Every structure is written in structure tokens, then in C-alpha cells.
Image (spheres, rainbow, N blue to C red):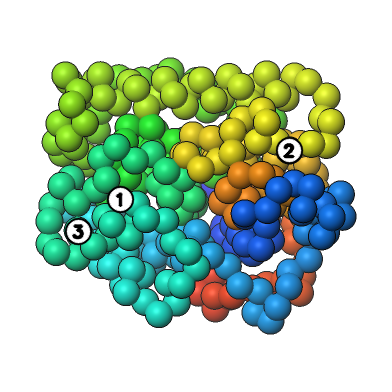
Amino acid sequence: MIAGVIDSSPRRASGSLFGLAYGDALGKPTEFLTVAEITRRYGPGGPRALVGDPALVTDDTQMALAVAWALHDASAYTPEVVEPLLRQRFGEWAVSPDNNRAPGMTCLRACAELGRGLRWQEATVADSKGCGANMRVTPVGLLDVDLDTLAGLAQLQAGLTHGHPTGLAASELTAYAVWLLRGGAGLADLPGLLIARAGEQRRVYRADWLGDLWQRCGATSPEQFVARGWDECRQVLDRLVAALGRPDDGGDPCRDTGEGWIAEEALATALLCALRHPDDPVAAIARGATTAGDSDSIAALAGAFVGAAHGMAAWPQDWSTRIEYADQLTTLATRWD
């Protein structure tokens, strides 16, 4: 199948949305543990079962739902329509009593500034490329849109809180990966396709979506600003390719592609987990949860990738009623499937 042509028969949107939540739930209790502590607690394969009823998620899934609902409510996918909806949903998340899952300080700080009514280019944390920029972007990749719109949406939702160019570029690549997989691309094809995209977009500044954001970071031009982000993403994608060229020793994938606290490393390490276990989605998210880094974000993104590749049948059938926010995930996934 040609990448980008939606094939809904495997329920790929459901597989991706639920996969993100499943990975998040498995990584939630392991995020601040060492790999030795994780394997001592769960065994060498890491956590492979949901715990609790419901099984709780973190701010990663909560913010992905905020993005998803903003997209769901949009009458058109333009910056003028989508930005106020993202601002509203992020603001509601920030003050929600459910926002008690150790959320990132960048997101909280930016949301507070958005709540004061500042332009988002002024509210964002301009020097942050934390993984909060792309842990929530995967719903963008589930839309049946052209690549320019996908890029604009991905970068805009990132930019509201994380203004660093690498946060923007990594978010676009994360959404693009989901878009490709939902369109039928193979997991093994992703590194090459993402590297090609990074090269093509290296000096493309989307002013219609980003406005004057580039001026916040001391860049001499919009092109210089955005090139930095794509270059940093390309560097970590090269590390991903190098890692895939070596046999899997079963160890912590963070050793090869980083701990995932920053956007480009979260993308690459999640991809590494997915590509190490392309035919075993539960093993892919368990691998993400068995890391010394940002385990919930890594496992969540890995789940979104393998879920988009395999569809809802990838996951244990009883998990869909046991995960937190199952009703919202079902409503959104049903629309996009």
C-alpha cells in the first residue's frame, strides 16, 4: 500500500491511541527506576501486564488526549482554528484535579502563561526541547491530511509549550511516523523515511503556523532556526540506524539513542524499541518500560508506533476496558478508524 493512503481495516487509529496509553501505563511505575530494579521487580522481559482497574496513565496520555480532542473539535485544520482549541484544552488539563501525575515543569509553566492570554510565541518556553513536545503528538498522525498540514499541526502543538526547534522537528517526525504506519508503511522502513524527511525539511520554516517564533531563540534567520532542529534529529536518527546494525543484546536501548528526556531521543529510543520487537507489540512497550530513562514516554511512543502498524488486534483484548480514559480513547479512535 502507498504510504499515506488510509487503510482502516485493521483499526490502526485504535491500535495507536490505545497503544500509547498501554505503553504509558506500563512505564508509569518504572520511570525513575534503574534497569536492574525494573528487572528485579518484573523479570528480564519487564512489565507485560496492566495493573489496576483502571490501569492508570500519566500526563503523557492526558496531554495526547488534549491534542486529540482539539483536533476532534476543529472545523478546519488551520492555525487560526486549531490554536485556540489547543490553548483551551491545555489550559483545562493544567487546572484539572487529574493533573496529579508529576507533569513536566515546561508544560505547566507554558500553560500558565497561555492562561494569562499571552500570544503563544511569548508563552512558550523557548529553550525547551523536552519530550513533552512529542509525547502527545501522535494523534496528529492519525488524520487524513496532506503532509504540509500534518507538519504545521505537529509543530504548532509542540510550539505552544516547547519553543526549541528540535522539539518542533521531533514532533513532526513522530507524527509523520504514525502517518506512514497508518498508511501501510513497514516499521523497518521508518528510519530511512524519517532521515529523508529531515533532509527535505531542513530549511523549511512554516511561518504560517509558527509566526515569529524563530526570533525568540536568537537565530539570525528562520532557516537557521529550523535547521538546528532538523540537524539534531538527523544525528539521533543516525545513532538509531547504527544501533539497528548491531545485534540486540537485550539491554537498555537508552545506551544507544538516549534516555528520552528530550524530544529527539524520545522519538529515536521509542523507535528502537518498536524495531527490536516489530512482531510483538507487548514486548515493544515492555522494552520501552524497561529503560533507565523516561520510561513512560518511551513506552507510550513505542505503543503508538506498533499500534499504528498492527492495529487494535495487536493488543490483549481485555486491556481496552481496563485502561484509564478508555471511553475517550474509544470515542476518538472510532471516529478516526
Looking at the image, which residue is at 26% across and 24% down?
Answer: 225
Q: Are marks 1 and 3 in contact (CB under 8 Å)?
A: no
Specify the quadrant of the image occupied by residue 103. bottom left
In this view, the residue in front, 72 or 87, is 87
**Which quadrant of the figure contains the C terminus?**
bottom right
Left or right of 329 on screen, residue 28:
right
The residue that mark 1 highlights is 161
Amino acid type assigned to the residue bearing label 3 in the image: Glu
Mark nearer the viewer, 1 or 2 = 2
The residue that mark 3 highlights is 113
User: Sequence-wise, which precedes: disc 1 or disc 3?
Assistant: 3
Q: Position of residue 134 (x, y in %)?
A: 45, 46
Q: Which class describes the residues within 10 Å of circle 1: few (<14), some (14-19), or many (20+)?
A: many
Q: Alpha-carbon distance for marks 3 and 2?
A: 37 Å
Amino acid type assigned to the residue bearing label 1 in the image: Thr
The residue that mark 2 highlights is 252
Q: Position of residue 2 (x, y in %)?
A: 58, 34
